[in-house]
Image (tube, helix red, strand yellow):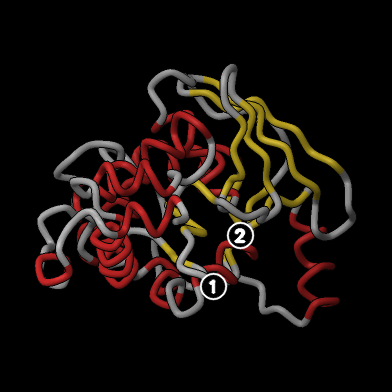
């Protein structure tokens, strides 16, 4: 019997179909595995978070996906647990102990603010406009210096329509001229362009508490207040 099948048989099916008590434990297990190891949890780790049942854990993952706490792929694997990614989306984020895929420019800048043992990381990417490589040291003390800009093509209210595509488009460019060139060539409408200072402030507190039990996603009004607090206003940033 495979490891997955064995883990899945540890709790009676009748209980599995009704048990939602482990959802938060499963969510925290996912986020902490990413934070510590740079990857989603293994099958045994997921089962352990659901009192020994992989089936219960999988049901929890689907509910968490529906609640936008994480994103599953077509094979029921965790693809995104913002700010972490299990798939390459244009960013590598290297800490002293761990290497991550960053979900987007926003998420890559957020990782050192969220992971307690990694106060400074190296964010590496390439400009989608010209292909120029870029590497920035991002820490908690203040924004990095540089002429790069972050481009957000998809308005906040539409980001979850296709969240994997949204994340893949939230990239760092050399400057705004590279954004303009890329937008014209790709046929993508130009969205909101942020300098590194604004991007750093946007990322610094957005995911606060996500590694802990009891985390709650912001309601739209709370998100709008947060955006205003870092200088982002207007219809594009209305949640």
Residue 23 coordinates in the image, percent (x, y): 20, 56
Q: Residue at x 55, y 29 (%)?
A: 143
Does the rendering let one see residue 66? yes
Query: In terms of secondary structure, where does tag 2 sit?
Result: loop
Residue 151 coordinates in the image, percent (x, y): 63, 59
Does residue 128 lie above or below 155 as drawn? above
Q: Of marks 1 and 2, which one's residue comes earlier in the chain?
A: 1
Q: Quadrant of residue 31?
A: top left
User: Looking at the image, which is closer to me, 24 or 218?
Assistant: 24
Q: Quadrant of residue 56?
A: bottom left
Q: How many marks overall?
A: 2
- Which numbered circle lies on residue 213? none
Q: Quadrant of residue 16?
A: bottom left
Residue 11 coordinates in the image, percent (x, y): 17, 57
> Which residue is disc 1 drawn over?
154
User: Looking at the image, which is closer to me, 139 or 175?
Assistant: 139
Does the rendering let one see residue 206? no
Q: Indicate left or right for 88 with 140 as reference.
A: right
Q: Residue at x 59, y 49 (%)?
A: 105
> Which residue is disc 2 drawn over?
170
Q: Quadrant of the C terminus?
A: bottom left
User: Looking at the image, which is closer to me, 112 or 62?
Assistant: 62
């Amino acid at each position: 019997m495979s490891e997955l099948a064995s883990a899945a048989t540890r709790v009676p099916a009748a209980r599995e179909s009704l048990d939602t008590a482990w959802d938060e434990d499963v969510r925290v297990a996912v986020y902490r595995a990413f934070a510590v190891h740079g990857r989603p949890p293994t099958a045994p780790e997921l089962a352990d978070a659901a009192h020994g049942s992989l089936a219960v854990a999988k049901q929890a993952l689907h509910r968490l996906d529906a609640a936008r706490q994480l994103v599953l792929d077509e094979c029921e694997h965790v693809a995104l647990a913002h700010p972490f990614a299990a798939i390459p989306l244009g960013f590598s984020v290297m800490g002293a102990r761990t290497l991550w895929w960053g979900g987007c420019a926003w998420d890559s800048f957020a990782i050192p603010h969220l992971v307690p043992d990694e106060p400074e990381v190296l964010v590496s990417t390439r400009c989608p406009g010209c292909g120029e490589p870029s590497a920035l040291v991002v820490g908690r003390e203040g924004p990095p210096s540089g002429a790069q800009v972050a481009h957000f093509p998809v308005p906040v209210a539409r980001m979850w329509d296709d969240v994997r595509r949204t994340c893949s488009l939230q990239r760092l460019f050399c400057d705004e001229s590279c954004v303009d060139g890329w937008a014209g060539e790709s046929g993508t409408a130009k969205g909101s362009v942020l300098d590194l200072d604004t991007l750093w402030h946007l990322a610094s507190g957005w995911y606060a508490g996500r590694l802990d039990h009891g985390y709650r996603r912001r309601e739209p009004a709370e998100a709008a207040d947060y955006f205003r607090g870092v200088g982002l206003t207007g219809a594009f940033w209305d949640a």
